Amino acid sequence: MQRMCSMVPHGGHRATHRLNRDLVYISDSVGLASFCERAQRHKVLAVDTEFIRERTYYPQLCLIQVGTGEECACIDPILIDDLAPLAALLTDGDIVKVFHACTQDLEVIHATLGIECAPVFDTQVAAAFLGLRQQIGYGALVESYCKVHLLKAESLADWSRRPLDADELQYAEDDVRYLPHIHERMLGDLTRRGRLSWVEPEMALVTDASRYVRDPREAYTHLKRANSLTRKQLAVARELCAWREELAARRDIPRKWVVSDELIVEACKRAPRTLDRLRRIRGAESLGERDAKALIEAVGRGASCPAEKCPSAKRKDRPSPDTESVIDLMYAMLRLVAERSGVATQLIATRDDLLEFVSHREESRLAHSWRYELAGRQLADLLEGKVGLTVKDGRVETL
């Protein structure tokens, strides 16, 4: 396939042009509106993004690729002022948007366009129900379904630089070229196996906006070493992390550039109420006076939190040795179920899920819906002594 290598610079006149017979590079509003009008006629669209986030709080969308199955477009959000036609396309309830590992893509789309993209089909989620490993990479998925080996030479490209060259755009296009075909095959396989109803709730969890739209008051739950803090110290952490989150967002810088997790944890433990006490913590010397005072005020708010309103420490109780042995046996059964069904082990249940099934069965997700149908019932029989496990010809089998 011949490719045109001419590129459109800033201020160039050709804002929409073809790099090959079905790849379009769009860098102005007229070209975008025209493509979106064509794309609107399709019921399934493949979508991917290229972005950078090393130096900012918000991910910076540098390119968005959309494939219809007939053509692929690389849309340049850096050069296009009005992305409204694209936003309308991505929120059209009659068009399924197909992603692979969608969480970060949905986050950057939300940050840039202010929309929640829907409905979404994630091929990585679906793959785990169809005999492929959980969190399979896109390249491996394409190789499995399309027998095509993708080169990843541009994976570390600086997507914010302009102009983009033909190799970069070809690389970007490959990320959506094969998705419509893979989606069609997956949908057929899931329907034939009666698993489409299993996938839909998992897809809803993955695409839930709460996964990528953070409440600053909940930021402390992602703090490293938070499990070493008492409830009172967690109240301080909640205030400090909310302050850091809001400041990082306002300045659009990475949160760790405000203060590190390590400094926050130490401040929670020492609860400094003066600049002198704060400066005694390693790393705090780099804080400007205004930020240092704001940090101290946040410490004060947390320290004055009433005991009954302090967050609960989320510590895992270590199971007894006997319970650990039971979970080991259950996990062997779980792997057997996964092997026979072709559903990834970790998707069915984690060891924490198994522990919850032992200790609080009705609250466990293994006691409900497709997980109970697939594995929960057999695990219950194992716990009640109705079935057992043995080794036959070097393989685990049920008795």
Image (cartoon, rainbow, N blue to C red):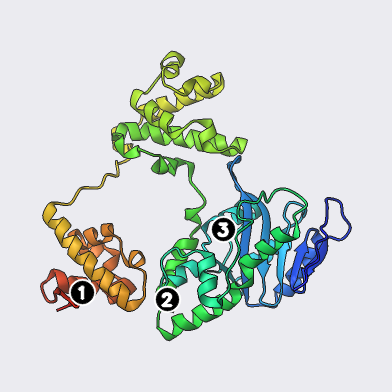
Q: Which residue is denoted by mark 3 in the rendering?
A: 106
Residue 336 in the image: above or below residue 151? below
Residue tagged by mark 1?
394
Q: Of 378 and 296, which appears nearest the observer?
A: 378
Can you tell which quarter of the image residue 65 is in? Answer: bottom right
| Residue that appears at 48% across and 45% down | 215
Q: CA distance from mark 3 to mark 2?
A: 24 Å
Q: Position of residue 394 (x, y in %)?
A: 20, 74
Residue sitting nearer the eye, 276 or 70:
70
- Do residues under tags 1 and 3 come within 8 Å of each other at their CB atoms? no
Identify the element where label 3 is drawn: helix
Secondary element under disc 2, as helix, strand or loop, is: loop
Is residue 92 visible in the rendered structure shown here? no
Q: Amino acid at mark 2?
A: Leu
Front tag of 3 and 2: 2
Mark 1, mark 3: which one is toward the viewer? 1
Amino acid identity at mark 1 = Gly
* In this rendering, position of residue 372 left or right of residue 250: left
Q: Residue furthest top?
A: 276
Which of the two discs, 2 and 1, sits closer to the camera? 1
CA distance separating discs 1 and 3: 45 Å
Near mark 2 (Cα within 10 A), the count class, few <14, some 14-19 or many ≥20, is some
Instruction: State whether residue 98 is above or below residue 297.
Output: below
Report how many numbered discs are placed on residues in the image: 3
Which residue is rendered at x = 26% and y = 63% of the image?
Answer: 364
Q: Earlier in the sequence, mark 1 or mark 3?
A: 3
Q: Is residue 47 visible?
A: yes
Residue 130 numbered tag: 2
Q: Residues within 10 Å of mark 1 (few under 14, many from 20)?
A: few
